[in-house]
Image (cartoon, rainbow, N blue to C red):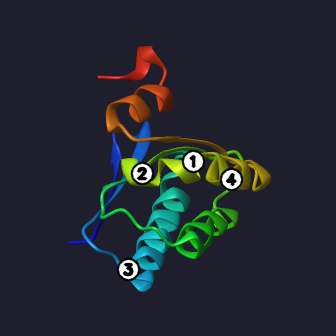
Amino acid sequence: MPFFADLMNRGLYILAEYDGKLSHAEIEAGRSSLLELMQSSGCRRVLIDFSSAPSRKSTEDIYSYAESFKSFPSGTTVGLVIPAGQAWCAEFIEKLAANRGLNLKTFVDHEKAKAWLLPVSETC
């Protein structure tokens, strides 16, 4: 299964994980599912984890995914875990997300992203 999304920690955040080599259509389907979950739950804290996906080197692919943040509700906080090989694009993704009204920070470590996303008093 290339995509998984669910409410975590009693609804404190949504975890979305992408796994394996992904087509553009699979990434878009995952994003649509994530948006539906955000709308139905009202949750605005999201941890998106691409760390298990092979490093994608295409600047166009990265721009396309970052551009999709415009469909996220304004005020959403996103921790985005990217493969270490993609760390070069972190600043670009963060700036593009900020232009879309999102508080987004990129990470190469899942636990660090989760710690940033959730206040200490709310982690389990």
In the displayed orientation, state which residue is furthest to the left.
1
Which amino acid lies under the numbered mark 3 shown in the image of this protein? Glu
* Residue pointed to by mark 3: 26
Alpha carbon separation for disc pair 4 and 1: 11 Å
The circle drawn on residue 97 is 4
Task: Name the N-terminal-most of marks 4 and 1.
Answer: 1
Q: Name the residue under label 1.
A: 90
| Mark in the foreground, 4 or 1 | 1
Disc 4 + disc 3, Cβ < 8 Å: no
Say if residue 98 shows up in the picture.
yes
Q: What residue type is labelled 1?
A: Ala
If you read the primary sequence from the N terminus, does the residue marked by circle 4 or circle 3 appear first? Answer: 3
Task: Classify 10 Å Cα crowding around label 3: few (below 14), some (14-19), many (20 and above).
Answer: some
Which residue lies at the image location 50% right of the left edge and 60% below the top edge?
40
The answer to whether 55 is drawn above or below residue 79 in the figure is: below
Q: Which residue corresponds to mark 2?
A: 82
Labels 3, 2: front one: 2
Q: Residues within 10 Å of mark 1 (few under 14, many from 20)?
A: some
Q: Which of marks 3 and 2 is nearer the N terminus?
A: 3
Q: Earlier in the sequence, mark 1 or mark 2?
A: 2
Judge from the rendering whether residue 68 lies leftward or rightward of residue 9; answer left or right. Answer: right
Of helix, strand and loop, which one carries label 3? helix
| Near-viewer residue (95 or 42) | 95
Residue 118 screen position, x and y as percent: 46, 27
Q: How far apart are marks 4 and 3 (CA)?
A: 21 Å
Give the Cα separation between the discs numbered 3 and 2.
Answer: 17 Å
Q: Report the mark closest to the observer, 1 or 3.
A: 1
> Which of the marked residues, 1 or 3, is nearer the chain's N terminus?
3
Which residue type does callout 2 highlight?
Ile
